[in-house]
Image: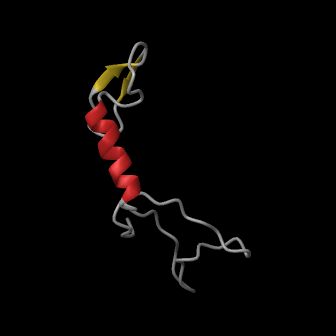
């Protein structure tokens, strides 16, 4: 089975790949560095079920890796 590396988007084999889903150790470490530097974030919901970064009257939009609203 072939998969696309989430870091560099190169198509790579799943079977026999020690770094899957990444194509290489380099791409795996780049991804780890992004998590460590908080470029990736998992948004939490408040007790009321709302986005804590959401301002009243403002539509909730998807965010890019820098936290900027897209759309």
The N terminus: image quadrant: top left
* Residue visible at 64% across and 69% down in the picture: 45
> Eyeballing the image, is 54 above or below 45?
below
Farthest residue toward the bottom? 56
> Eyeballing the image, is 10 above or below 37?
above
* Residue visible at 38% across and 19% down in the picture: 17
Nearest the eye: 44 or 69: 44
* Residue visible at 70% across and 71% down in the picture: 49
Residue 47 coordinates in the image, percent (x, y): 73, 74
Q: How is the structure coloured here?
A: secondary structure
Q: Is residue 45 left or right of residue 68?
A: right
Residue 54 coordinates in the image, percent (x, y): 54, 78
Residue 22 coordinates in the image, percent (x, y): 36, 31
Find residue 29 and report its image quarter. Answer: top left
Residue 55 coordinates in the image, percent (x, y): 53, 84
Find residue 46 and report its image quarter. Answer: bottom right
> Eyeballing the image, is 23 above or below 45?
above
> Eyeballing the image, is 1 above or below 69?
above
């Amino acid at each position: 089975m072939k998969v696309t590396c989430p870091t560099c988007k190169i198509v790579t084999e799943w079977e026999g790949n020690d770094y899957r889903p990444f194509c290489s150790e380099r791409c795996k470490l780049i991804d780890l560095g992004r998590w460590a530097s908080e470029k990736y974030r998992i948004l939490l919901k408040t007790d009321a079920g709302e986005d804590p970064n959401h301002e009243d009257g403002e539509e909730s939009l998807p965010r890019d890796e820098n936290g900027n609203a897209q759309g």
